[in-house]
Image (tube, rainbow, N blue to C red):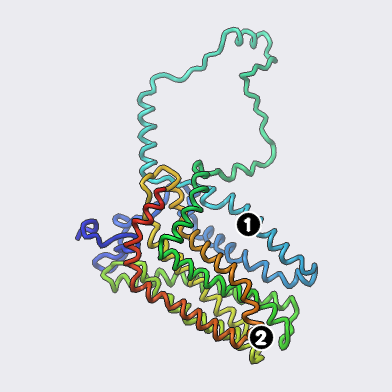
Amino acid sequence: MDETDTGLYFPGTTRILDERGELIGSDNFTLVPEPSNDPADPLNWSQKRKALQLACIILAPALAAICSGYMYTALGWHAPPAFACGFAAITAIFLFIFLEETNFTRQNTDSVTTQEAEVDHQSENKTAPETCVVEASVLAETAEHPDVVHSMDRIVSPWPGPRPWKLFKINPKGWGIIWRTPPYAVAFAVRIPIIFWCGFMFGLYQILYNATNALASGVLSSPPYNLAPNAVGLTFLSPFLAIGPGAVGGGWLCDWWTVRRARQNHGISEAEHKLELFLIPTVLTPLGILLMGLGPYYGVHWMCFVVGEFVLSVAGPLAALLSITYSFDAYHEIQPRDKQGPQYQVQQTGPYVLSIMVIGMIMTFGFNYVITDWAFKWGFLNWAISASIVSTAINLSYLCMTVWGKRLRRSSISAYEKIINW
């Protein structure tokens, strides 16, 4: 049956298995975006380079927290925030230089074909080499006085030192990308229900992650634990070690589950299939919160609180991965009409991800002012019970998306196309 005639296939609903239940080969299945022949293309990176990038992403946010106790003991309370700010500034500069959006420009297939045709046409019509006409008087004067410097002479004085600006090149459509991305992000958050839901789920787990940071010092450095600042800092190894099974293992789990569900669905993969994995963070989140709240309330060993951080940090990256992946599956295949303009470049960067992060950061900013009072003033027992109920109720909304998500995806395609073609 022809896919284009049935109308059953649209972004997020794709056939990935053939009649024998095997993955469709490269003849019928194309990556979006399509990898180029450039070895600098991130899609062509080696496994070692990808592993190095992943290690830096995981280690960067955990390094400041793990070392904070030692810095506080040696340099005072000013050192941890100063170190964090400096580290963030260095990271921002590094990302600006080496991030794909600023260091690599991927051209789509249509533009490359058009440019090659223009080059061939120009080479065929080229009949004589270009000549440079110089006045005879200038040539004569140069012959008589070879040391004379004219205004048209190009004096080259190469810089003998390192040239860091050669490491990257700014996208020629950079300004168009910069001024379009924020309006796109706001419009997606307001107009597209799926993106708003993904941002809301992302924000929930950002709040819970901030809760572990906000409560750890106050709980573990106070009676009955009375841990030293160095020991409190080392307890952040717990969420750091949880990132592996939550994020890395979650990626493998999503791929395996996608293929498994496609086999059960006659080879067709739905974006909502991955959302079924939200059952895992739905169960783990209240468990981690109860361990973090009931342990200090009943005076259980401090490992109870640390294990709660670990459990919550396994659920958080997995939930964030599922939210962002769902939006990617639903909208990344949609392309603007102008394949040569900045709209195309913006869509390749995934502006819907920025919308998700904006919603999540707004939620996190508001709850940062109530997390401490919620736990310390109302009591850890009340905090644990209420936070578990609220998080479970929000997580169960994934059941609604598994039922009505496909309908929302189909109905929001036209709105997404209008926004991306601005």
- Tell me which numbered mark, 1 or 2, is placed earlier along the sequence: 1
Residue at 77% across / 69% down in the picture? 77
Which residue position is annotated with label 2?
Answer: 302
Q: Judge left or right: residue 353 versus residue 273.
A: right
Relative to residue 407, is residue 389 depicted above or below?
below
Q: Picture quarter containing residue 274?
A: bottom left
The amino acid type, in three-letter code, at marker 1 is Thr
Q: Judge left or right: residue 262 versus residue 245.
A: left
x, y percent for residue 190: 45, 61
Which element type, helix, strand or loop, lies under badge 2? helix
The amino acid type, in three-letter code, at marker 2 is Trp
Relative to residue 264, is residue 96 depicted above or below?
above
Which residue position is annotated with label 1?
Answer: 91
Work out whether residue 31 can be spotted.
no
x, y percent for residue 70: 75, 71
Relative to residue 419, is residue 263 depicted above or below?
below
Marking on residue 263? none
x, y percent for residue 181: 49, 52
Relative to residue 260, is residue 90 depicted above or below?
above
Which element type, helix, strand or loop, lies under badge 1? helix
